[in-house]
Amino acid sequence: MELKVKEKVLAELEKIVGADFVSKALPDLYSYSQDMTENEPSWPDFVVMPGSVEEVQGVLRLANREKIPVVPIVGGANIGGLTIPLKGGICLDLKRMDRLIELNDKEMYAILEPGFTFGHLRRYLDKNYPHLTYSYPLSPPYTSVMCNAMLMGMGDMAVSLGMNADMINGLEVVLPTGEVVKIGSCSVSRSWFGRAPLPDIAGMFIGWQGATGVVTKIAVQLWQKPKYVEGATIMTYDMGATFRFMRRMAPMRILDELFIVPYETMKVITTKTTGPFERAPGEPEFAVLTAIAANSEDELKAKAQLRDAIIKEEFKDTKVDVMPSEPTDLPIRGQIDALGGCTWMGTYGPTSRWEEATEKVFQLLDKYKLPRVGFFRPLRQGHFGMWRPIIAFNKSDAEEVDRVRKFMREALTLALDMDHVPYKAPYWEVQEMMKRGDPNWVELLRRVKKMLDPNNIMNPGRYGAPEE
Amino acid sequence: MEVPDEVKDWAARCSRCGTCKYTFGQYLPSCPPGQKFRLEGYFPSGRLWIGRGLQEGVLSLEDEDVLERIYTCTACKACDEQCASLPKEHIVEVIEAIRQMVVGAGCLLPAHVVMIESLKKNDNVLDKPKEERGAWAEGLRLKDITKEKADVVYHAGDMLSFDPEIWGAARDAVTLLQQAGVDFGIAGKEETCCGGRAYEIGNMAEFTKYAEHNIEAYNGAGASKVILSCADGYSHMKLLYPKVNAKMNFEVLHIVEYIDQLIKEGKIKFTKEVPMKVTYHDPCHLGRYNGIYEQPRDILNSIPGLELVEMERNREFSWCCGAGAGVKQAYPDFSLWTANERIQEAKATGATALVTSCPWCERNFKDAIKEYGEKIEVYDIAEIARKAI
């Protein structure tokens, strides 16, 4: 951006949000130029922190007029390089918009602004509605409820209910051209009870990584907190039996949580180092973390009996250790003593491919001298699953970063070959999917993007980006 | 530009997960500058990344924006308390190391230059004439340790020495010592700064000079104990002096530790009712730096008629008063905003008085009350204890 234009834009931005909430200071731009992933940094020109919908509109109208890229961001901990401003421009930090607008305990939903975090939500519910809960992700508290849902993340109820995107009741979005639009029941009634039975245009925004507009309000579903919860950790010694057990349990609606971590994941968490580790003889191959929720002790007991019976059947030919464990209290604190770097090949896909995919990714991790760390979880009672090798790495070691980058490229090919689709995908994964994908799907993405964002200002380089 | 090991070792370790930004489990803000300015560079994680940027050579110490983000940190250590993985317990260390780089590069903020010049001229950071030091003790007939030996030395520190409005904290502290029959004295006009503020703004040479001087002076007085009412001074003497190349022959105690000990030994007895509802503010240098949480509460709970109520963020979750690490001098408005946040939290408890055990906290709360037109009394813990005798 030319200096004179920059000065003019700065003056206008300051008029819109106030001088205290616009920065072109290098230490701020540096902070927003990168994240914890291996993705290359790219510097913004400004960081802007709007405090209201009107201010967001003002910024977008200006950006659209001047054709300045705008990248929405809240916590910036998405593990996908999603808020790195690939083409510079404005990082639109929505932290200041952190109000809870309404909590409806009858229809069990909350209307939130983008800066309202999991920490905020947990605090508010515990204090005011202790009988309600949310599908909290395995993430630190300073992350946005809205971002997690819009990016198709998941929480601790994903095994039965699916992604948090499935629990969005409605949206308020500022379009790149500045109009405010309501989506869902709230567009025709006062209630934000759901998206049905209207044409579901939320799909023009969910999963788009901020490339089609800025969400300024979101209604998310809350759930009744179960009275009884029992956790169990199952240490297993055979991959096939582990995944078979998972596939059998998921559709039965017995377990409310079921996630599988390779042995080295446990080592990384318990030793607080990054590995890699040699698995000693006799040590388990996987840990399966489970939780049962119930409304009565009898229900809890009955579910536990069923779980134990299935464990006995599925692991009859192989060793298994079952131990009681406390279900994870969410949100969590950052757990891995990394060296500043963290990335993943986070994907959704068919669980029937997991044995093959996991064998292959383990070989790939070994090839790049990376620990066999990952999280695998069936979603929506096993209709699909989250398959996610995860890597903590030394961000200031160029050789290690290069190794991680090479791994990620090969892991993407592996994942796509295994029919898995990356979520929270960085730009280069999006490009690869658009290259491999149905050409008409790609064309439709581009048409939707062009219709909503004629000047391609919103998070350029992501889904629907014009061909360069 | 030489990058200190602390920056090399720890600045790159932060993945910016954001855990440092909340008090865990309560999910209330933990970092005053982050909460005030909201931009990432004002949060602990942003500061660590600034360290990384300096190391990479893409950021410069001559950039005023870098300095502002580095020097709005009050070194309250809430981030080190909250961070659950590395760089846990090294965050403030990195910020202090960056400040040493700033001093090395000759880029110190003007307000801090004034502090250092005052140290050189007056032996205090407050730009007050040296001769006025010791005036707080007038009429108390305390032993002068420059002339006679004493088992215990009471070190008033800069803030208590030169601010008549809060002299009560020091005068009541020594009155309690007198009543308990403690053999103690003061250095009066000859007392000097502890050097802690110099350390906090990155001037190691000035800090070392004062540390060595005080160690020599108090060793020379034959003292077995040095007692302070100032939490900052206490922490600096206790944690930093042992790193200086001079052997300390004395133990360093904060007045709350000593009073608590004297109460438990039966040497101080509270006999008068103090019918007050108070809340206690944990000074960062007493709490998070030294783990002293229960002694002040034990003292307050042993006072007849006094009701102690807790603020939501208490003990290791305590919100900083905003005065530390040179912030009060360089960023007075932000410093008062921080204090006012705490005052609002104190008022929410229903207490009529906010009690603390550091003169920097007391001063800043009093200033914020004036600035924001608030109504709550502020006391040092010794003043409350004195009322009960």
Image (cartoon, coloured by chain):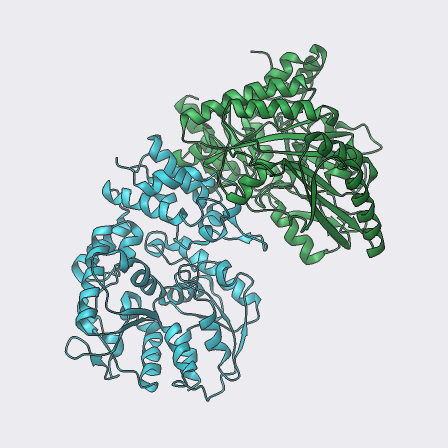
Chain colours: A green, B cyan
Taking the spot 38% from the left edge, 49% from the top edge, the residue there is: B92
Taking the spot 42% from the left edge, 74% from the top edge, the residue there is: B381
The quadrant in which residue A262 appears is top right
Q: Position of residue A295 (x, y in %)?
A: 82, 53
Looking at the rendered image, the quarter that the N terminus of chain B falls into is top left
Q: Position of residue A406 (x, y in %)?
A: 51, 20
Q: Nearer the viewer, residue A362 or B167?
A: A362
- In the image, residue A250 sits, relative to residue B240, either above or below, namely above
Taking the spot 38% from the left edge, 35% from the top edge, the residue there is: B52
Q: Is residue B355 left or right of residue B103?
A: right
Q: Position of residue A237 (x, y in %)?
A: 66, 36
Q: Position of residue A412 (x, y in %)?
A: 60, 20
Q: Nearer the viewer, residue A347 or B279?
A: A347
Looking at the rendered image, the quarter that the C terminus of chain B falls into is bottom left
Q: Is residue A461 visible?
A: no
Q: Is residue A441 left or right of residue B127?
A: right
- In the image, residue A251 sits, relative to residue B354, either above or below, namely above
